Image (cartoon, grey):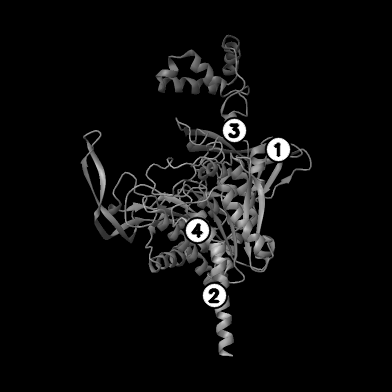
Amino acid sequence: MKNIVSLKILLIFSLTAFAQQEYKTLFEESEGTKTPEYEEVIQYFQNLADDFDQVKVVEMGMTDAGYPLHLVLLDKTQVFDPQKWHEKNRPILFINNGIHPGEPDGIDASMMLLRDILLGKQQINDELVIALIPVYNIGGHLNRGSHSRVNQNGPEAYGFRGNARNFDLNRDFIKADTKNARSFQLIFNWVRPHIFVDTHVSNGADYQHVMTLISTQHNRLGGQAGQYLNEELNPFLYQKMDEKGFPMVPYVNAWGGKPEDGWTQFKDLGRYSSGYAALFGTLSFMPETHMLKPYKERVESTYKLLEAFLEILNKEGNKIVNVVKSDRESQRARSEFAFNHILDKEKHSLITFKGYESGQKPSDISGLPRLYYDRGKPFTKEVKFFDTYREGQLIKKPEAYIIPHGWYTVIENLQRNGVTLTRLPKDTTIKVSIYHIEDFQTATRPFEGHYLHSNTKIVKSQGFMDFRSGDYLVTMNQEVNRYIMEVLEPESEDSFFNWNFFDTVLQAKEGYSAYVFEDLANEFLEAHGRMRQVLEEEKAKDENLANSAAAQLRWVYERTPWKEKEHNRYPIFRID
């Protein structure tokens, strides 16, 4: 009997070893120097799906490159239906790779991780579900070379940061200018993961750590999930990575300074993947390996971090599901939401940082002082990490928003993100709160195809407005309330307004002929004596106004009934 058991163990080991060899990745075959081309990546996952019933590969949406976006699902119970996963309260891990294809570490790590789960080398609970995008930025992955990341230490060839239209996809999660982002939004809101991991590679200062981590900002995430992230999940991940031989620190956000002086936590707005996911209550992360480290070490550290996520989900999957689920449900009843978070410089934690001494030496190019790091002088010290943010603004939730149906780009964005909208059945007059854009600043240089607005200020009033049959009503009793307010409140940093969705209302469409309007304006002032008095008061305070006939005529026009009501009026309305 003992011999039979031994033979069975030997047979299982032999089959596993054979399978391990059969599904060997290019990364392994090249001893950590190469990463596969796009077609090879997709074929690898398709081979796993063909050979293992627990894996399914689906195409979901199109990309700017003209290729469909692939989603790989691993479900030991072979259900492959997110709605049923959520009905059974099953934990869901969603991994996104290749958003910047010059940073392919996660692609190779995910290929090996999925294989190792299927071959039994990695153990996961039957309830745990994994969804992953093998390559998100397909256009960038096809734009393959070895020079686009000038300082990167391998692999031999890799993709480019920009997508097929040269967009940085990790700035596109709110505005969704690309087909990639629109497809991603559909996928994300179909899967609705509990943990989301978007794999990256960093640059910047030199230090000993191979892996750094951006965890979504816990104060912005808020609720039970924010507390769990800060007090339990993050400490678990850092401890595990230390045990696995890759001691980790938070993303070294020390641009323009020395890491040993400490740094602030990266504020991941909704434009970034982790900030976007957090708007839906998801515990979200951006691992950032260091580009100066050998590619083999970077991939291995990414694999170990993904392994740590499996371990916490095996251990506390039910708790994670309950925390996220409870927070999402609580969004329905919340009365106000926090925006525009500000760093609290009075609070910090201490982290162990393994760095290299930095200094200045003459540049061989300019002869002027230049920064360098001396790898012959490593050090370990406690540094300050400023990781507390407080709300910059609180905005009360309305009962509903009304969106005239002409603003279809806004409507389509909301629909892709799981927002429920209903249409007014007939023309109707409704009392609403109205925003007028009082002030804002606009960037002088383009950023990802936009001239971003910032520091937006509004004036709020109330009035009755006529709406038409087919206009959209967004009632604020939804799990996605936070996302809705983040994009629809114009003062929010990453609002649709600040991303230029409504710039047409900032330009007046009608005007006047001065020589004709002059007499009409005078009649208006004669009929409104107080208005003339106010004009005289303003002229007394403003020399430029007093010395400009055109400016005075414009001042009068802006206060008459002929001034177009649409100018500077925010075209989405609140029912308060």
In-image side of 462 versus 256 (left or right): right
Q: Quadrant of residue 346?
A: bottom left
Secondary element at tag 4: helix
Which sits earlier in the primary sequence, circle 3 or circle 2? 2
Tag of residue 13: 2
Which sits earlier in the primary sequence, circle 1 or circle 2? 2
Which residue is pictured at 44% across the width and 40% down the height?
Answer: 148
CB of mark 1 within 8 Å of CB of mark 2? no
Which amino acid type is marked by label 3?
Answer: Arg
Residue position marked by numbered label 3 in the rendering: 569
Compared with 70, 63 (above or below) is above
| Mark 3 crowd level (few <14, some 14–19, many ≥20, 10 Å Cα) | some
Residue position marked by numbered label 4 in the rendering: 109
Looking at this view, is 356 or 17 the one in front?
A: 17
Residue 323 in view here: no
Q: Quadrant of residue 383?
A: bottom left
Where is residue 16? Give x, y as percent.
56, 71
Mark 3 or mark 2, which is nearer to you? 2
| Mark 4 crowd level (few <14, some 14–19, many ≥20, 10 Å Cα) | many
Residue position marked by numbered label 1 in the rendering: 405
Secondary element at tag 2: helix
| Mark 2 crowd level (few <14, some 14–19, many ≥20, 10 Å Cα) | few
Which residue is pictured at 51% across the width and 40% down the height?
Answer: 162
